[in-house]
Image (spheres, rainbow, N blue to C red):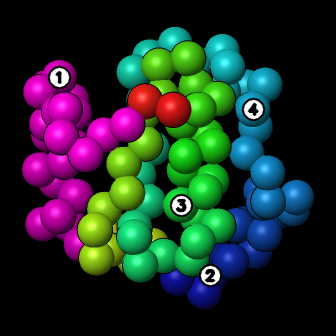
Amino acid sequence: MAHTLAYDAAIMVTFRYPIEQAASVTAPTLVIAGEASFPFMQAAARGLAGALPNGHALILEGQTHDVEPQVLAPVLEEFLLGRMTNGISRL
């Protein structure tokens, strides 16, 4: 993943999420963070979800920033099928 660090740094110069742009996204959006990630990542997920008109935050228990596919796949499936209600919060 080291080869992506330059791109990550270029995008995240200020480490602020684009609140103004997020406000224009009307599609239901799930913002996910891992419970074992850095605390700022969880705060960012909640903040971004709150900036989205139809945003929802989900903190995945026991997961880091590198979420395990077997944990992520069922969460995405439930959200995309419109069946997710457990653990999701509208901020």
Which circle's residue, 1 or 2, is located before the other in the chain?
A: 2
Which residue is identified by label 4?
19
Task: Tell me residue 18's x, y (percent).
Answer: 76, 37
Q: Is residue 91 above or below residue 4?
A: above
Which circle's residue, 1 or 4, is located before the other in the chain?
A: 4
Whether pointer 1 and pointer 4 mark residues with C-beta atoms closer than 8 Å, the reply is no
* Picture quadrant where residue 70 is located: bottom left
Give the secondary structure at mark 3.
helix
Query: In front: mark 1 or mark 3?
Result: 3
Say which residue appears at 36% left-offset and 48% top-offset: 58
Task: Tell me residue 27's x, y (percent).
Answer: 44, 16
Q: Is residue 6 above or below residue 70?
A: below
Query: In front: mark 1 or mark 2?
Result: 1
Density class for disc 1 (Cα within 10 Å; few <14, some 14-19, many ≥20) is: few
Give the secondary structure at mark 4.
helix
Task: Tell me residue 28's x, y (percent).
Answer: 39, 21
Find the distance from the CA under tag 1 to the CA under tag 2.
36 Å
At label 1, the amino acid type is Gly
Which circle's residue, 4 or 2, is located before the other in the chain?
A: 2
At label 2, the amino acid type is His
Density class for disc 4 (Cα within 10 Å; few <14, some 14-19, many ≥20) is: some
Whether pointer 3 and pointer 4 mark residues with C-beta atoms closer than 8 Å, the reply is no
Which residue is identified by label 1?
82
Give the secondary structure at mark 1.
loop
Find the distance from the CA under tag 1 to the CA under tag 4.
25 Å
Q: Is residue 66 visible?
A: no
Whether pointer 4 and pointer 2 mark residues with C-beta atoms closer than 8 Å, the reply is no
The residues colored magenta run 68-89
At label 3, the amino acid type is Gln
Which residue is identified by label 2?
3
Say which residue appears at 53% left-offset and 61% top-offset: 42
